[in-house]
């Protein structure tokens, strides 16, 4: 299996530290606004990566952070905290803002069939771990304190900027990073920001009438909050150890966020932080960078409101390689929806239905043909997740003359990677198969309801839900449905 490693700008053979288990860390969303379809593309990429690893037999430990503090409006460690700023605008607490937009993010990923990471961690829950790393860096002489916070001295680290291939000497103050006269080097970045200048205590600041932040913590350097990058170092080390196999993000993370994650982590431990860096390309909308002012800033909700299935968007994403800059157009989505629907129809009612009638094998040539398709599919996955070719192969199989049941089996098996919900298409239009046990529970509940024993009936409803089904009460009758995979 080969992945394009941003660190070396080439495809490299994938060899995890533990031959059967992969540690995967993904930079998650900053939860101050609605997730848009650009985010959707990045997290579909992460999901496909994880599914490919699992399809290939690896056990994957997937960790993703939620940035609920410390991400400032300017990448240069200046400006407002995005979450706190939004809280002021909406007249809510910063904690409520974070909670609301976190839910929005997982609503979106759920609808896109994106599997949830094993560990989802919020920055605000890891302040002690972040402080510990900053202390380690301080002990190694890699930090200094100025009036607005504790900074990392990038000139003290050999190889700073290796991921982004930054030419430090070419960087002009104010170009990549904003002006801060107290900073020693233009690339230095904040590890800890003071709520009040020079880390004054909360009480003395209040005496001067300074406004208090909603999210702030005590630290050895003064009251404040963490810089954006330190959270990912702290949380990945906490859950996956000092060196991890794969770290993902969008390409916009390369020059600053991931560069600084490496500096902090490798500065503190003296060890390699990440073996493989994988980055998703940008998503343009109608040829332009997505922005609210251009009116081309779309959420998944907009896609659904226009009558598209979220999984049609997922299908569309799969038709472009994750590293390419992809141009989203409504026309392209229309095309994707048509193709996806056609595929579903093929699986549900068309040629590919699993039938009971036995199909005679004509000769062994067919078996080798099926084998050949499987092999090609794996080759595409192994070649840096070549989903466009894998999707094209699906259509080649559909049009081929191998037996229908083989077509069905191949495509449903491959859907473990695509995540398009293709398995089960054959029963969707038929009656739902419900176990005797669940049927018994439904009956029991109906009886309790007749007797107006609402509380007990409710307990049974919960039990039914735990078994993966939903009950809807329509007048006298209970209707049972398969529970969606995600709680939205
Ligand atoms: Zn990160």
Image (cartoon, rainbow, N blue to C red):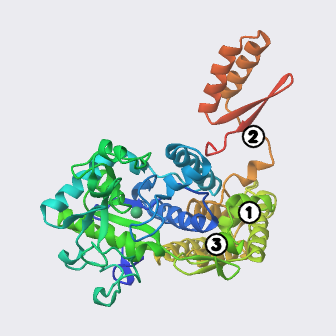
Query: Of label 3 and label 1, which has the lower sequence position?
Result: 3
Rendered-image quarter of ligand 1: bottom left
Helix, strand or loop under label 2: loop
Q: Is residue 48 above or below residue 392?
A: above
Query: Of label 2 and label 3, which has the lower sequence position?
Result: 3
Query: In this view of the protein, which residue sits in the foreground, 18 or 127?
Result: 127
Query: Of label 1 and label 2, which has the lower sequence position?
Result: 1
Q: Where is residue 223 shown, x and y percent of the image?
A: 30, 48
323 horizontally vs 341: left or right: left
Q: Is residue 361 visible?
A: no
Q: Is residue 310 visible?
A: yes
Closer mark to the observer between disc 2 and disc 3: 3
Q: CA distance from mark 3 to mark 1?
A: 16 Å
Instruction: Give the residue drawn at x 27%, y 57%.
Output: 198
Instruction: Give the residue drawn at x 47%, y 76%.
Output: 384
Q: In which quadrant of the rendered image does the N terminus lie?
A: bottom left
Helix, strand or loop under label 3: loop
For disc 2, the neighbor class at 10 Å (few under 14, some 14 to 19, many from 20) is few
318 horizontally vs 45: left or right: right
Q: Is residue 180 above or below residue 202?
A: below
Residue under numbered circle 3: 291
Query: In this view of the protein, which residue sits in the foreground, 441 or 235?
Result: 235
Residue under numbered circle 1: 303
For disc 3, the neighbor class at 10 Å (few under 14, some 14 to 19, many from 20) is few
For disc 1, the neighbor class at 10 Å (few under 14, some 14 to 19, many from 20) is some
Q: Quadrant of residue 368?
A: bottom right
Residue under numbered circle 2: 432
Closer mark to the observer between disc 1 and disc 2: 1
Q: Where is residue 415 shown, x and y percent of the image?
A: 61, 61
């Amino acid at each position: 299996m080969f992945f394009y490693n941003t660190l070396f700008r080439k495809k490299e053979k994938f060899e995890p530290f533990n031959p059967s288990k992969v540690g995967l860390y993904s930079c998650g969303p900053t939860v101050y606004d609605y997730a848009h379809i650009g985010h959707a593309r990045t997290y579909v990429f992460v999901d496909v990566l994880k599914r490919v690893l699992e399809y290939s037999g690896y056990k994957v430990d997937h960790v993703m952070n939620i940035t609920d503090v410390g991400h400032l409006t300017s990448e240069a460690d200046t400006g407002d905290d995005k979450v706190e700023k939004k809280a002021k605008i909406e007249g809510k607490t910063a904690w409520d803002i974070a909670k609301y937009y976190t839910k929005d993010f997982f609503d979106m990923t759920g609808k896109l069939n994106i599997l949830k990471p094993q560990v989802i961690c919020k920055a605000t829950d890891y302040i002690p771990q972040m402080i510990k790393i900053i202390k380690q860096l301080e002990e190694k002489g890699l930090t200094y304190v100025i009036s607005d916070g504790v900074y990392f001295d990038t000139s003290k680290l050999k190889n700073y900027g290796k991921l982004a291939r930054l030419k430090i000497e070419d960087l002009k103050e104010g170009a990549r990073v904003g002006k801060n006269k107290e900073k020693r080097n233009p690339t230095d970045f904040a590890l800890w920001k003071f709520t009040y200048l020079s880390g004054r205590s909360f009480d003395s600041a209040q005496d001067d009438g300074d406004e208090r932040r909603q999210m702030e913590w005590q630290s050895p350097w003064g009251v404040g909050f963490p810089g954006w990058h330190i959270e990912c170092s702290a949380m990945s080390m906490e859950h996956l150890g000092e060196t991890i196999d794969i770290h993902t993000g969008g390409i916009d993370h390369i020059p600053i966020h991931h560069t600084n994650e490496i500096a902090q982590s490798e500065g503190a431990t003296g060890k390699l932080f990440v073996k493989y860096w994988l980055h998703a390309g940008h998503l343009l909308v109608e040829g332009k960078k997505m922005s609210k002012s251009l009116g081309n800033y779309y959420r998944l909700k907009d896609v659904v409101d226009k009558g598209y299935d979220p999984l049609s968007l997922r299908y569309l994403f799969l038709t472009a390689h994750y590293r390419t800059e992809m141009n989203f157009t409504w026309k392209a989505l229309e095309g994707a929806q048509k193709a996806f629907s056609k595929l579903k129809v093929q699986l549900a009612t068309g040629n590919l239905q699993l039938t009971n009638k036995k199909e005679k094998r004509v000769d062994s040539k067919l078996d080798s043909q099926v084998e050949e398709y499987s092999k090609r599919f794996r080759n595409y996955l192994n070649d840096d997740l070549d989903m466009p070719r894998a999707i094209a192969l699906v259509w080649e199989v559909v049009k081929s003359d191998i037996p229908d049941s083989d077509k069905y089996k191949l495509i449903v098996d491959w859907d473990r990677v695509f995540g398009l919900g293709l398995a089960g298409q054959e029963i969707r239009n038929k009656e739902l198969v419900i176990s005797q046990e669940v049927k018994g529970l439904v009956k029991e509940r109906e009886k309790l309801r007749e007797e107006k024993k609402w509380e007990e009936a409710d307990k049974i409803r919960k039990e039914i839900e735990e078994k993966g089904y939903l009950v809807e009460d329509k007048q006298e009758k209970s209707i049972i449905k398969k529970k969606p995979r995600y709680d939205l």
